[in-house]
Amino acid sequence: MKYILLLTYMFISFSLCNAGEIIKKQKKVLFLGNSVIFYNNMPLTLQKMIDEQNLNIKIDQLTFPGWLLVNHATLVERYIKDQYVRAEGNEIPISVKKILSEKWDMVILQEIGGFTLIPEFNEISFEPSLIFLDSIIKSINSKTVLFQEYSTNNFPWQICKNKKEIETFYSFIQRDDNNNKYTPMLSDFSCCSKSFKNSSEKFYELKNEFDFMAKKLNAGLVKVGFAFEGLKKKYPNISVYASEEDPHPSPQGSYLIACLFFKYVTGKNLKNVKYAAGLDQKDALLIRQFADIIK
């Protein structure tokens, strides 16, 4: 009898240990970005693909309409005129709190479209914000992954911002005229990207910036922009944009993004994925097959 009880105890202990190992091995992935990510419930589509394959991976997001990475790096959950405000003193930005809230295996950072083509914006907003967030991610032994920007669909195309606007609202470094922590240029002239004639020209510039930062930070890079350019050429009848005027991803574009991140997060191809997120099954299959050839 004692022998049977001992075996039973050992079996229960072994089972609990295995269950604990399964729980420990759950992969956790966080997206930080804006509406490009949450459009068409892209993270939910990704989660359903993962669940369909019985993979123990949790997808989470902290995304706000119109947010730049500088907002994720500096804003706290305190309001002035219904707006989040910059962290002061010992306040911790809301997105930094989110990063530190769990042991994420990877944190995916996504910038708003087009701004990174303005050199001055890169210098005082995108690059320092990205470096800061990457340092927080590395502090929990997690991996930074960059969401490569995609080109839009209206050309000729150029983006300009007033220099004072960039310094006041978009700078990672807080302006402080009292103790001169940061001396603003205070110029009223416009800071502009190049003028681009077509989508390929624009994407080439985006690719250079994201390749540069991925290499600098030793970060992962998911080639969303590259995939958008390729799908447009291979299947011109499948639109990746919400509309001619709206550069947000269409349902097909969001599905392509989910497919790319499925591959990156799981390390698996899409051969066995069937979930189509409400798309025409033929289109969904073409998108999955196309995503599978992206390296």
Image: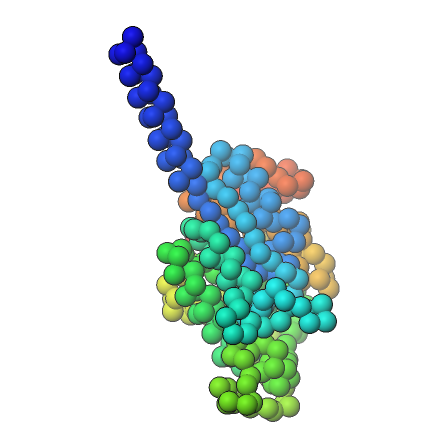
Give whichever of 138, 287 is nearer the camera: 138
The residue most toward the left is 3
Q: Which colour scheme is used?
A: rainbow
Relative to 14, does residue 147 appear above or below in the rendering? below
Q: Is residue 55 visible?
A: yes
Quadrant of residue 135 within the rendered picture: bottom left
Question: Quick one: 196 or 181, which is closer to the camera?
Answer: 181
Residue 128 horizontal side relative to residue 187, left or right: left
Q: List x then y, in percent, for residue 124.
A: 51, 79
Residue depicted at x 53% and y 36%: 51
Image coordinates of residue 164 in percent, x first then y, are 62, 86
Quadrant (top left, top right, bottom left, bottom right) of the N terminus = top left
Check the image and name the residue furthest to the front: 2
Q: Quick check: can you spot residue 222?
A: no
Q: Write the residue at 49% across / 86% down.
A: 181
In front: 8, or 155?
8
In the rendered view, does 200 fall on the left or right side of 139? right
In the image, residue 107 above or below residue 17: below
Q: Which residue lies furthest to the top in this view?
A: 1
Going by the image, does 79 lie left or right of 24? Answer: right
Residue 78 placement (x, y as % from top left):
63, 67
| Residue 238 sits above or below residue 116 on the image | above
At x 47% / y 68%, what residue is drawn? 130
With 291 as the anchor, is 189 left or right in this view? right
Q: How many marks?
A: 0
Determine the residue positioned at 55% across, 74% down: 88
The image position of residue 83, as x and y in percent, is 68, 69
Seen from the viewer's position, the closer of residues 292 and 186 is 186
